[in-house]
Amino acid sequence: MKLKIWAAVLVVAIGVVGFLILRATVFCEDCGPQESGRVEDTVNAIYDLEVSLNERNEFQVAASISVTNYSSDTWEDIGFYLVPNAMNSEETSFYKDDDVWLEIIAVSVNGEESGFNLDNNELLVELDTDLEPDSTVDIQVEYSMVLPQNGMRLSQVDNNFYLAHWYPMLGYYQNGWDIEDYDSKGESYDTDYGDYTVSYDLPQDYLVASSAEDGEIVAASTGTVQGDNIKDFYLAIMDPDEWEFETVAANDTKLRVFTPLSADMLEETSGLAAESYVYFEEHIGDNPFGELDIIGNDGYMEYPNIIEVAADEESQESVLVHEIAHQWFYFLVTNDPYEEAWLDEGLTEFASSLFLSDYYDDDEYGFWGAQMAQEYYPPETYVNLPLDEFKEESYYSTIYGKVPILLKDYFNGLDGNETALDFLAAYYEEYQFEQVDTEEFREFFEDYFEGDQSEFLDSWLE
């Protein structure tokens, strides 16, 4: 789930009806990089991130990133997404009064000061010595940052800080660094899996939740967390006086659930989270990670091993299930969200609608949110368009509405939900920890089903 515009549409409707690695190392210490969806020109990175917060609510970030050139090309520079630099009204028209302030202090390569170019959210670090294939270089970036009050995704809300895409994220190299300008209607950064060590130093004790396994919920002012095979790294720093929380089990995974003290929704959120998580594991496939954090901060967003959901019980159901399903389609099977958002958002909404259909034994109810999205605005003919070719309204009606509805109709012509879940399970098994594009999805679809599927696929995939 992305912008609050779409979230607001859902919330209004919910009120009406009562709800609404890099290639992965695949957890093998002795294995080398595995093949990803892009066989050629992939990269690898190990992140060591140090973040401190002072009493003036200013962040200092020191990022040390070890980058290996797994392509067949020789590199003259290294490309990163530094998204906070584009989160202001000068760079992105969406922003008005919620600008991020960011200032780079130093950039170095192997400990030596280096030149760089920062344009929109693209940070290109110059290399004095070209990086040959299979060689590694260490990049260091230091900067200061102040988050906007009540901003989108990267935000300070009262005495809580939500750090999304806050560090230099290594881009994809494919015949050059393919880094698009920031687009606020969806996710415009295309990253791959990496290993992370993140240390934090805070002016007081906070509750910390992250993409790593954080363990027992205890407020602290300092700490270090580690996580491997993570697509991108999210960090939340929360005032312990504002939250109630608990840890519940979902199969072998611990769900750490945080909801506002004033909302009285912890038990309901935890219960539905556990039921939907277990459903996706049993019907689609095992999630190899041991912890998922759930924060009820009205963020309506997914990140690896952590999600932001609604802050009120009335809006929670469809949002919570959707964001949990993203752990399978966005994180564990990934895609370029700028070029092909339908592969994560569309499949996620389809999977979450299947859960709600089975949960209530009512397909109409389960797919009601997708149906409403499709009717919100005329969808595009083809769903696999890049972000900049969508109108904001047609993006939501196409990706969140048209995709799950047309898949529902297709599988209804077979054996319905059971066949759909079997297909998603096979797709997940085939592409776990890989990046998939539309062409690969088409080929898998054609191979999975008997007969020529081109007429169906050609009608919605360009």
Image (cartoon, grey):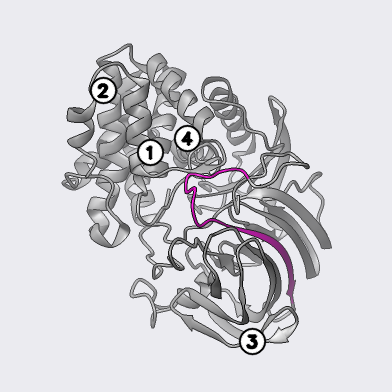
Q: Residue furthest top?
A: 415
Residue 294 in view, yes or no: no
**Any mark on residue 114, and which?**
3
- Amino acid on which the number 2 mark rests in the picture: Tyr
First in sequence, mark 2 or 3: give its number: 3
* Count of marks overlaid on the render: 4
**Any mark on residue 410, and which?**
2
371 in relation to 88, above or below: above
Q: Which residue is mark 1?
A: 440
| Identity of the residue drawn at 17% across and 36% down | 459
The CA distance from mark 2 to mark 3 is 54 Å
* Boundaries of the magenta span: 34-53
The CA distance from mark 4 to mark 1 is 32 Å
250 in relation to 82, above or below: above
Judged from the image, the secondary structure of the residue bearing numbered disc 1 is helix
410 in relation to 315, above or below: above
User: Where in the figure is residue 255, as x and y percent of width and height?
Assistant: 68, 37
Determine crowd level at label 4: few under 14, some 14-19, many 20+ residues with C-alpha closer than 10 A: many
Labelled pair 2, 3 in contact (Cβ < 8 Å): no
- Amino acid on which the number 3 mark rests in the picture: Ser
- Amino acid on which the number 4 mark rests in the picture: Glu
First in sequence, mark 3 or 1: give its number: 3
- Amino acid on which the number 1 mark rests in the picture: Glu
Q: Which numbered disc, 1 or 2, marks the residue closer to the eye?
A: 1
442 in relation to 21, above or below: above
The CA distance from mark 4 to mark 3 is 49 Å
